[in-house]
Amino acid sequence: MAFTWGDAVRIESFAPAELRPGAWASVCGIRVIEKENEASAVGYPLGTTMYLVEFEDGHSVEVPEALLAPDESGHERLPKDR
C-alpha cells in the first residue's frame, strides 16, 4: 500500500470527474478488492487497493490507488484521534 490512514493525497488529473480530479483529500479507509462480486461492483480488478478519502467539505469517495498521488502542497494529515 502506498498510503496509510490520515495521509494527504491528491486525486490524479486523469481521474473521472466524479472523483474530483486535482482535489486534495485525506485517507480515512483502506481495503483490497478480494472477491469477484466486489470487483464487478466497483469496476476494478481483484487485488486493487481502494482508499476511502475525505475532502475538505466532508464528502468522501472510494478511489483506487492508481488514481491517487501524494499531496505535496502542504496539507496536513488528519489527526490520529479523529
Image (cartoon, rainbow, N blue to C red):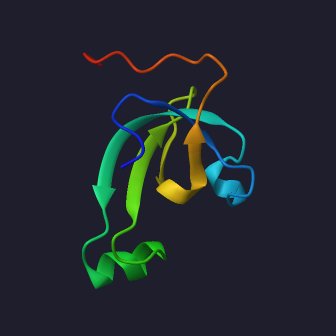
Number of marks present in the image shown: 0
| Residue located 59% across and 55% down the image | 67
Position above or below: 76 against 58: above
Q: Quadrant of residue 40?
A: bottom left
Of 73 and 17, nearer the camera is 73
Position above or below: 8 against 11: above
Instruction: Please provide percent x and percent y for residue 31.
Output: 29, 55
Q: Quadrant of residue 11?
A: top right
78 sits to left or right of 19? left
Position above or below: 52 against 59: below
17 sits to left or right of 46? right
- Quarter of the image with the C terminus in it: top left
Position above or below: 17 against 28: below
Instruction: Please provide percent x and percent y for residue 20.
Output: 67, 47
Q: Residue furthest front?
A: 2
Of 58 and 42, nearer the camera is 42
| Residue located 30% across and 62% down the image | 32
| Residue located 72% across and 56% down the image | 17
Instruction: Please provide percent x and percent y for residue 73.
Output: 67, 21
| Residue located 62% across and 52% down the image | 19
Q: Quadrant of residue 66?
A: bottom right
11 sits to left or right of 59? right
